[in-house]
Image (spheres, rainbow, N blue to C red):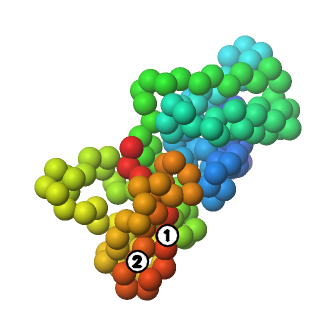
Amino acid sequence: MEHRYTQNQRLWDILDDVRDPEIPVLSLVDLGVVRKAEVIGDRTCITITPTYSGCPAMKVMEEDIRMRLMMEGYKNVEVITVLSPAWTTDHITAKGREALQEYGIAPPEQATSDKNALLGHPKQVTCPNCKSRNTSMLSQFGSTPCKALYRCLDCLEPFDYFKCI
């Protein structure tokens, strides 16, 4: 029996190929930025939420979505940005977390809350290279504002950590 995709599933499959401009191993779907994808009449409507309100990559994301869908034959593509509900790192898929790890970026912890800060303990981040938890933060800001710079105290390699938001 032949598997037939719905129009909506086809949209999600195409969007799963649109990469984050700052972290190219993540699709916008795996990053959790794409919230809704639907065809309404003759319009194709994609709803996205920025990772944070000042994200400089949003215009690039919008254009990449629009261009990719138009290349697939979709006309009248509308990309709608919504701020609520706010994006959090909880929206990153399991596949996205794995991709970050393999790329050398420590994925965010599962929960957005970190009780260590309340207790005055340093954040425990796993090194994506050697998997050690013996790490230390070098800077609250890494290669992009959504990442912090850490160093592994065992393998001595620096690495980005995707901050929990």
Three-letter residue code for mark 1: Phe
In the rendered image, the vertical position of residue 52 relative to residue 93, given as above or below:
above
Q: Position of residue 123 (x, y in %)?
A: 28, 61
Horizontal placement of 53 versus 115: left or right?
A: right
The residue wearing badge 1 is 159
Whether residues under marks 1 and 2 lie with C-beta atoms below 8 angstroms apart, the answer is: yes
Task: Name the residue: 43% across, 30% down.
Answer: 86
Residue at 80%, 20% in the rendered image: 76
Callout 2 environment at 10 Å: few (<14), some (14 to 19), or many (20+)? many
Residue 124: percent from left, percent from top:
29, 66
31 or 145, nearer to the observer: 145
| SS at badge 1 | strand
The one of 81 and 152 positioned closer to us in this rendering: 152
Farthest residue to the front: give it.
139
Task: Identify the mark at residue 136; answer none if there is no mark.
Answer: none
Horizontal arrangement in the rendering, residue 135 relative to residue 39 (left or right): left
Residue at 68% in and 17% down? 40
| Mark before the other along the chain sequence, 1 or 2 | 2
- Marks 1 and 2 sit apart, C-alpha to C-alpha, by 8 Å
Q: Is residue 80 left or right of residue 145?
A: right
Q: In the displayed image of the protein, which residue is found farthest to the left?
A: 119
The secondary structure type at the circle numbered 2 is: strand
Left or right: residue 98 compared with residue 118: right
Q: Nearer the viewer, residue 105 or 38?
A: 105
Residue 30 position in % (x across, y down): 55, 49
Q: Residue furthest bottom?
A: 155
Identity, as a three-letter code, of the amino acid under mark 2: Cys
Q: Which residue is under mark 2? A: 152
Image quarter hosting the C terminus: top left
Front-most of residues 77 and 82: 82
Residue 165 seen in the current view: yes
